[in-house]
Image (spheres, rainbow, N blue to C red):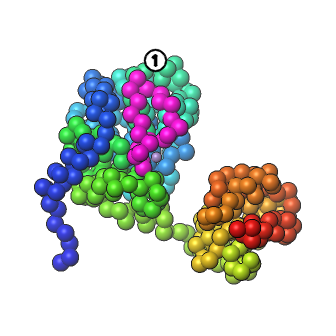
Amino acid sequence: MGSEVKRDDTQMEALAAILAGGIDAGLAEAGWRLIAAARRIVLLAHEHPDPDALGSALGLAHALRPLGKECVVACADPAPENYTFLPGRESIVTALPDEAFDLVIALDAGELSRYGALYTRHQAFFDTATILNIDHHITSSGCGQVNIIDPVSAATAELLTLFLLARGVAIPKVAADCLLAGIITDTRAFEFDATTARTLMAGAYLVGQGAVPEASIKPVYRMKPLAKARLWGAALDREMRVTADGRVVWTAVRQAYLAESGATADMDDGLASYLLDIDGVGIAAVFKEQAAGSATKVSLRAAAPYDVAAIARRFGGGGHVHAAGCTLAMSVDEAIHALTPELEAAVRGK
Ligand SMILES: [Mn+2]
C-alpha cells in the first residue's frame, strides 16, 4: 500500500477543466437545456449492447439522479451476465413500463432503428418524443432534436465524461465505474488507435473518482470458462499447422472437440487473434466445423500489410482488411485444402 498515489484534488480540478473544454460548448449547452427541462428521462442503450452502450446509459443515469431526475435505463436486450462491473445493471428494463417520459436520451447509436424492439414497439412515441442523441460513431446521422456526435471520442462514455464536466456535474463512483468500463471496452484497454491523450485523461479522471480498470478488464478480456481453455488446448495441440516460413498459421475446431471439452459453439471466439499474435505470423485462420459437418466457417486475421478481406470475398465472405471470414459448403479438411494455398500465396506475394 506504500506505493499508492494519493488523490490530488488540484490535479483533478485541472483535469476536469481540460476535459470540460473538449466538447462543443454550444452543443453541450443545447443538450443540458433539454435535460434541465425534463423530470422523467428514459436512457436508451442500443440493441445487442456492449459495455459502452450500457455503461453510458447507466453512468449518465447515476449522474443525473442526484440532480432530481427520475431515470429509467432501457435496452432491447438484457445485459450479458458477465457485465457484473456495471453498477445498476439489474435495474435495466427490456420493455418500457409506460411512455410518460419527457426526454429520451439515445446513447452510442445515431439511428432509432438501432434501439431494436424498444423502438419498433413504441414507434409513435419515439417519433414525436424529445430526443437527445449522444454518440461517437462517424457514420451516425443523428436521431434527436440535439445530436452530440463526436467521432474523435473513442467511446460514448468518453464524450459523456466531457459533457458532465462541461456542466460541472459531479461524477459519483458508480457513474465513474460505468463510464470507465465503456472507455476500456471500446479501446480494448486503451490499445486501439482510437485512443487519444484525451481518452487517457478521461480515464484518469474516472479512476480519480474511484473507478478501477481491472474491474472490467479482467472479466471482459481475461476470464474464461474451463471448457474454453480445454477447447483451445485440443485445437492447438491436435490441429495447429504453420507454413510459409512461419508466416501462415491455422487450426481447426471440430465438433468432437466441442463435445469432449463441454464447450459451447461460441468458445472459439478469440482463437484466430491468439494465433495471429504468434511471433512472425502474418495471416491466421481458424476452420470451424459446423453442426451438420457439411460446412466450415473460416475466421481470418491478418497483420499489416496483408489483406484477408480480399481472400474472404473470393470465397463468398467478407469483412475488414485485418479481420474477415467466410463459410464454405465443404468439410473442414476440404476447406483447409482449398483455402490455405491462398493464404500462403498472399504472404509470398509481399
Ligand atoms: Mn461505443
Q: Quadrant of residue 290?
A: bottom right
Residue 234 in sight in this render: no
Report the residue at 80% width, 51% height from top: 316
Outermost residue toward the front?
A: 350
Magenta stretch, residue numbers: 136-157
Residue 140 location, x and y as percent?
Answer: 51, 35
Judge by depth and name the residue closer to the eye, 257 or 150. 150
Residue 47 location, x and y as percent?
Answer: 54, 40
Q: Amino acid at mark 1?
A: Thr
The residue identified by callout 1 is 128
Report the residue at 27% width, 25% height from top: 33
Residue 213 in sight in this render: yes
Outermost residue toward the left?
A: 10
331 falls in the magenta region: no
Q: Main secondary structure of the magenta part?
A: loop
Residue 101 location, x and y as percent?
Answer: 37, 24
Judge by depth and name the residue closer to the eye, 325 or 51. 325
Q: Quadrant of residue 235?
A: bottom right
Callout 1: SS: helix
145 falls in the magenta region: yes
Q: Quadrant of residue 267?
A: bottom right
Q: Quadrant of the C terminus?
A: bottom right
Report the residue at 76% width, 58% height from top: 311
Report the residue at 49% width, 20% height from top: 127
